Image (cartoon, rainbow, N blue to C red):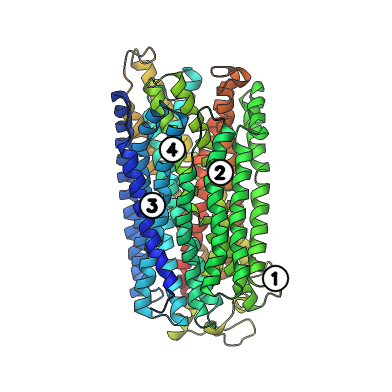
Amino acid sequence: MNVTPLFWLVPIASVVALTMAWFFFKNMMKADEGTPRMREIAEHVRKGAMAYLRQQYLVVLKVFLVLVVLFAFMAYVLKIQNPWVPFAFLTGGLFSGLAGFFGMKTATYASARTANAARKSLDSGLRIAFRSGAVMGLVVVGLGLLDIALWFIALSYVYGSDHVSLITITTTMLTFGMGASTQALFARVGGGIYTKAADVGADIVGKVEADIPEDDPRNPATIADNVGDNVGDVAGMGADLYESYCGSILSTAALGATAFASAGDMQMRAVIAPMIIAAVGIFLSLIGIFLVRTKEGASMSQLLRSLAVGTNTSAVLIAFATFLILYGLGLDNWVGLSFSVISGLTAGVVIGQATEYYTSHSYKPTQAISESAQTGPATVIIKGIGTGMISTSIPVLTIGVAIMLSYLCANHFDLSMTAESISKGLYGIGIAAVGMLSTLGITLATDAYGPIADNAGGNAEMSELGEEVRHRTDALDALGNTTAATGKGFAIGSAALTALALLASYVEEIKIAMTRAMEGGQQFIDAAGNAFDPSKASMPEMMEYFQVTLMNPRVLVGVFIGAMAAFLFCGLTMGAVGRAAAKMVDEVRRQFREIKGILEGKATPDYGSCVEISTRAAQHEMILPSLLAIIIPIVTGIVLGVAGVLGLLVGGLCAGFTLAVFMANAGGAWDNAKKFVEEGNFGGKGSEVHKATIVGDTVGDPFKDTSGPSLNILIKLMSMVSIVMAGLTVAYSLM
């Protein structure tokens, strides 16, 4: 394999990431889990989370087996698919599932230890929670790069490393992204339904009707709520960002193979450049992780600043390192490409800061939602929806600027739209996505920290650790709400850039499928009646052949279907949460009514029945929305052809991105508006204002934890399915 020695940084970095994840895990396990009561509660949550995950993996396994059989039939019988696709699909799903599993296992062991550390100091609690979250971040990037490195090495030995082989290798590797996306969607949707069913039931009956505190042990849904935080926000998020991370690297590598196909050794350097940037990002993320610390009595803004020191340091360091990496690789226009990376990094920081502004109760938008609660829950909901809608403007404009800058920096600011300028510009957009995700090791740590802190607060409440400890865990929990919203904004921002790069990769996969069909005797005739050779066609020529213009009704119909898919998906997942939550509300009310002495603390609730309700609902309700994300691109490809699929992906990207930002930010703002009141503002806990904000938080729960974060996976999964099914579209399209 003829690669630069720098490539070996990729497997080395993956091993370092996994080793450090193990180091942080072992250090966390050495910490004291606290009192016997704290240990008991943690064990209940741990068993519930693992039991759910086992059942979820069984459901996903059945779906995977069906899809593998389909891919094998396409590859070995119909001969319209690369023969490696079934295996790549399986490894993608396996590694994505492992990332979620290891992250969740760590979180379930860390929550009680965080609560116990908070008995000592705020800083002790923050460090255990954050470094436990870092296990998730490091496992995701470590497994992601390991999977990429192993496949690249294996396929290079099979196909060689000439310019044609590299295009085949990189497009083949893209297909394991579908396995990761499928696993991630089931994890996100199932986990989101689970956690929000329990959360809504606990809030409505416990906090509003019974007027008992959040996470009170008298609430039968409390354990299910804590289990849900882990299966949804930890396992789901881990699988989600594993897919984003790998997708951005692989799509950029595929674009590099195409853009530099005639540039000799430059092609190989362009292919491995995103891998090396990601590898260096691991080392720089580790530096940022060790910088996170705080002081006793820190305010919300000071806690946010503590995390920002780590994340921003890593981002600045990777910006400088990018120039050295691309210069060392000797890439053409390495300065311009470096600025493409920086545009992606900057976009990630801006989106994160905008999300923080609209969701943290340190700022006016969320405080205004709390204030609106003085006139009841209706005004809370209206104000939250309005705030969420307004909050979309900055991320959308930021992504727009990042797309244009990364495109222009990569092609010497050439707007001629020639084949060369387009291919190099698209490579710039892809590498911008890599830049945004290059510090995922620490960025994901700030996200996974949130559920750990939330569970720590629940453990402290149920274990009756006292007001001072609860005050510290509340501060950590409120910080977690903001970091979770920031992480979701970051995830959807990276999804937008990655999905755009995947659009170009889809066209390349269509070229390969058409070339394979020509070798089988099929001929292609363009609109002028001339023979069309896809193997020699440029990107503009492919667009012209398929008539991808706004005047083509197939494109327009595809755009509408893509936009519809985003809303349909959200409607189905929110409806699922509503049905599951209704069952939970009925069960909690039944226990309060029939089990005498629960509210007086004289009887123990039946926690297991609530866990069972959430588990059954999640397993049943997650199937239809997840399968639709796979079926819609396949049907669109068969009915409307390539032009329709491209329209579908554009419509899904535009509507899905905007809708996801709106839902994540509105949900986060509602949650922290409640926290702002609970800190003693506008009447504090137990007041009518507090009850109104609880209703808002309840509405926001499926917004921010089920439908919203699942949309970024929907966007990428539809792209991945389209890429994998390119051969089917070419061979059997009706139009």
Quick one: quadrant of the C terminus?
Answer: bottom right
Q: Amino acid at mark 2?
A: Ala
Query: Would residue 583 appear left or right of 304 to someone viewing this image?
Result: left
Q: Is label 3 in a helix, a strand or a loop?
A: helix
- Residue 664 in the image: state x and y as whole percent: 56, 42
Residue that appears at 54% across and 83% down? 262
Q: Where 383 sits versus 492, above or below?
A: above
Q: Camera-side residue: 226 or 275?
A: 275
Residue bearing mark 3: 139
- Tag 1 near tag 2, CB within 8 Å: no
- Secondary structure beneath disc 1? loop
Give the CA distance from mark 4 to mark 1.
45 Å
Query: What residue is rendered at 60% in x and 73% in y?
Result: 424
The percent coordinates of residue 101 (x first, y second) are 34, 47
672 relative to 5 in the view: left or right: right
Examine the rendering and report whether any part of residue 297 can be seen: yes
* Label 1 – label 2 distance at C-alpha: 33 Å
- Residue at label 2? 308
Q: CA distance from mark 3 to mark 1?
A: 38 Å
- Which structural element holds mark 4? helix
Residue 413: which numbered mark, if any? Answer: 1
Q: Which residue is mark 4?
A: 127
Give the mark nearest the N terminus, 4 or 2: 4
Indicate which label's residue lies in the foreground, 2 or 3. 2
Q: CA distance from mark 4 to mark 2?
A: 14 Å
Q: Amino acid at mark 1?
A: Phe
